[in-house]
Image (cartoon, helix red, strand yellow):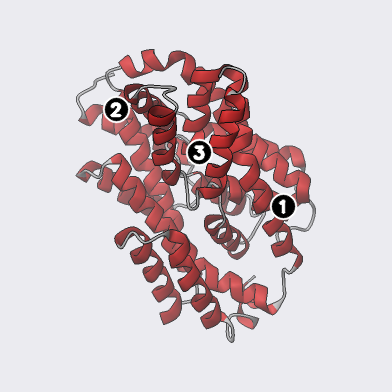
Amino acid sequence: MPDTKPVPLLALFRVFFQIGVLSFGGGLVSWIHREVVTARGWMTDAEFLSGMSLSQVLPGINSTNTSIFVGQRLRGALGAAVCLGAMLLGPFIAIILAGFTYKTLLGVSGFPALVEGVGAVAMGLLTRLGIKAARTVKLGLSPAAATLATFVGVAVMRWPMLAVVAVVAPLSVWAAWPSGTAKDAADA
Amino acid sequence: MRDNIYVTLIVLLAPLSLASIGGATGIYAPLQHETVETLGWITQREFIDLFAVSRLTPGPSSMLAPLIAWKVAGLAGATVAMIALYLPSSLLCYGVARVWEKHRGKPWHRACEAGLTPVAAGLVFAGVAALLRIAGSGPMTWATLIIVAGLLTWKPKLHPFPLLGAGALVFLLARGFWI
């Protein structure tokens, strides 16, 4: 079990502050997954990914919602506040600084290339998280169908995300009901 | 106007906080409509510039809203914008997270966990597709995306920051900037 003793609030602050400061180009959820699950083992993949799924269907930004799920899981209300606050502190200072200097920044001739390059890497980080999530699920027809249906509905058909999730998620949970209990406990 | 610019910010951003489901891409259009067309706080040109700048600052891309608020109402405006944009959705999320945590271990909780993960995978891929639409999707972007995703699947503990630096460098060189 990853949570034998509580994660210090200071450690949470440090990790989430670092995520906020370093995560150029977006894709913060993949950074959170890397720091919290892959590098430190504070949560299991299943715990993280389910919190992330809920974060995505709830109103608000995926990354801030996910930080709240992680903080709440590890250290309750205080943990949630620390994770959210720490993650937003660096970017807040950064946009104030950018506000002062943006005319100069935009004058730099390599600026668009820089934005493009950083953005492309961030998309790669997110893709890797998607692959990870897809692979975590037990192989089977219904999980694959749920992933595909969600993607096609939202990205290809451009239907409202909430409507797509409202249809696919209950079906997917229902399909996971009989076998998805004992086995998951063994995996975790 | 000056007196209630903070109120205007709250009225503008608090609903966006609760309306932005699935990421920041959903707030760009209403934000542009309100700040440029309805309120006339900034010009279209300035909106595009600030959008570009917000894409090169770290953190969530929704930070564009506090950046615009900083431009029109200074540090206090930016602070008000942060609270209006993140507090409502965060409180709601915290409430859900608490309930979720309380029922951990119950059979329905496990079924939800197992059932929601594939949906999350689909949403993450859809998020990448949305970014490809906004940021453009040339062959270099695709190649970078595939290389980064492959590299991290092979070596999950690689730190993403050097990858960001390498990506920026490759695009600079490819676009003809020698630094």
Residue B127 to residue A94: above or below: below
Q: Amino acid at mark 3?
A: Pro
Q: Secondary structure at mark 3?
A: loop
Residues beneath discs 1 and 2 located on the same chain:
yes
Taking the image as shown, residue B34 lies to the left or right of residue A47, namely left
Report the chain holding disc 2.
A
Residue closer to the observer: A75 or A8: A75
Q: Amino acid at mark 1?
A: Gln
- For mark 2, what is the residue? A112
Judge whether residue B58 can be spotted in this image: no
What is the distance, in whole Å, between disc 3 and disc 2 at their CAs?
A: 19 Å
Residues beneath discs 3 and 2 located on the same chain:
no
Report the chain holding disc 1.
A
Taking the image as shown, residue A17 lies to the left or right of residue A167, namely right
**Are the residues tagged 1 and 3 within 8 Å (C-beta)?**
no
Residue B145 appears at what percent x and percent y?
Answer: 32, 48
**Are the residues tagged 3 and 2 within 8 Å (C-beta)?**
no
Q: Quadrant of residue A112?
A: top left
Residue B77 appears at what percent x and percent y?
Answer: 59, 23
Taking the image as shown, residue A185 lies to the left or right of residue B1, namely right
What is the distance, in whole Å, between disc 1 and disc 3 at their CAs?
A: 20 Å
Q: Residue furthest bottom?
A: A178
- For mark 1, what is the residue? A72
- For mark 3, what is the residue? B60
Judge whether residue B150 can be spotted in this image: yes
Location of the N terminus of chain B by quadrant is top right
What is the distance, in whole Å, between disc 1 and disc 2 at their CAs?
A: 38 Å
Q: Residue at x 45, y 34 (%)?
A: A24
Residue A134 to residue A73: above or below: below
Report the chain holding disc 3.
B
